[in-house]
Image (spheres, grey):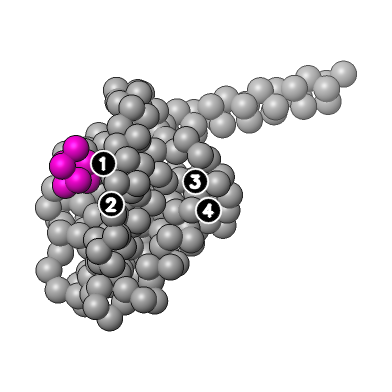
């Protein structure tokens, strides 16, 4: 009987420790996401990325810290100057994308982020990398949409890529512009939600729609 009580005690203690760990994880993630929402400079984004890296190192079973670390490095690449500096950030992003993929290989958010990193590498040097990376980015975005047809980030990024290709080849842009515009309602529905899951992209979508003149 004593062994049974001891076993029950150990199980209860284990659940309590797990609960405390989960609470600490949520608190750390929420704090990092709040800081991410106001980060603008490379230095500010680096500080936020480092926070997510530390969380990922402590909680290696969760994909979100790796996802957000990668996203911050991608965002750094867009505001950085020079191809080599941009490449440094996208290479760093890829290390965390790889970790997120290992944990969630069929997650539309992760698959779309891989495509976003390809698109960011392409944008750093489009004349040299367009042919090599445009197809890879399109493949990832299309795969993400197949996994989750309603995902606004996957659809927005796919539409943005299609728009860029249409503009490059002088083709009509009505379809990709409509695709991006169609994500606005989903982004609006995500606004204000208290969640650790990705909700970013509304500003990007609105910028693309404005570019389309809609």
Q: Is residue 177 visible?
A: yes
Q: CA distance from mark 4 to mark 2?
A: 22 Å
Q: Main secondary structure of the magenta part?
A: helix
Determine which residue is flagged by label 1.
205
Q: CA distance from mark 3 to mark 4?
A: 5 Å
* Label pair 1/2, CB-CB below 8 angstroms: no
The residue lying at 42 percent from left, 46 percent from top is 154
Q: CA distance from mark 1 to mark 2?
A: 15 Å
Which residue is at the front of the view, 146 or 39?
Answer: 146
* Label drawn at residue 173: 2
Determine which residue is flagged by label 4.
143
Vertical comparison of 102 with 203: above or below? below
Queried whether the magenta region covers residue 47, the answer comes back as no
Q: Quadrant of the C terminus?
A: top left
Determine which residue is flagged by label 3.
145
Q: CA distance from mark 3 to mark 1?
A: 16 Å
| Residue 180 horizontal/vertical position (percent) | 32, 42
Q: What range is drawn magenta here?
A: 208-214
Q: Is residue 54 visible?
A: no
- Secondary structure under badge 1? helix
Mark 4 or mark 2, which is nearer to you?
A: 2
Which badge, 1 or 4, is on the more N-terminal residue? 4
Query: Badge 2: few (under 14), some or many (20 or more) residues near its Cα, within 10 Å?
Result: some
The residue lying at 44 percent from left, 38 percent from top is 151
């Amino acid at each position: 009987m004593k062994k049974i009580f001891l076993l029950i005690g150990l199980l209860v203690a284990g659940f309590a420790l797990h609960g405390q760990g989960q609470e600490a994880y949520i608190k750390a993630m929420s704090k990092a996401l709040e800081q991410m929402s106001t980060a603008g400079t490379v230095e500010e984004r680096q500080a936020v990325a480092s926070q997510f890296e530390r969380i990922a190192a402590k909680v290696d079973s969760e994909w979100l810290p790796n996802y957000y670390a990668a996203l911050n490095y991608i965002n750094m690449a867009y505001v950085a100057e020079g191809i080599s500096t941009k490449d440094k950030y996208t290479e760093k992003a890829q290390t965390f994308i790889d970790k997120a993929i290992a944990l969630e290989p069929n997650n539309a958010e992760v698959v779309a982020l891989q495509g976003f990193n390809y698109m960011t590498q392409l944008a750093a040097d489009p004349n040299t990398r367009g042919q090599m990376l445009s197809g890879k980015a399109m493949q990832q975005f299309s795969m993400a949409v197949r996994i989750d047809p309603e995902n606004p980030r996957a659809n927005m990024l796919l539409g943005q890529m299609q728009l860029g290709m249409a503009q490059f080849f002088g083709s009509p842009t009505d379809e990709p512009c409509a695709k991006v515009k169609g994500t606005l309602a989903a982004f609006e529905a995500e606004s204000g939600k208290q969640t650790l899951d990705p909700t970013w992209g509304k500003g990007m979508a609105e910028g693309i729609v404005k570019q389309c003149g809609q």
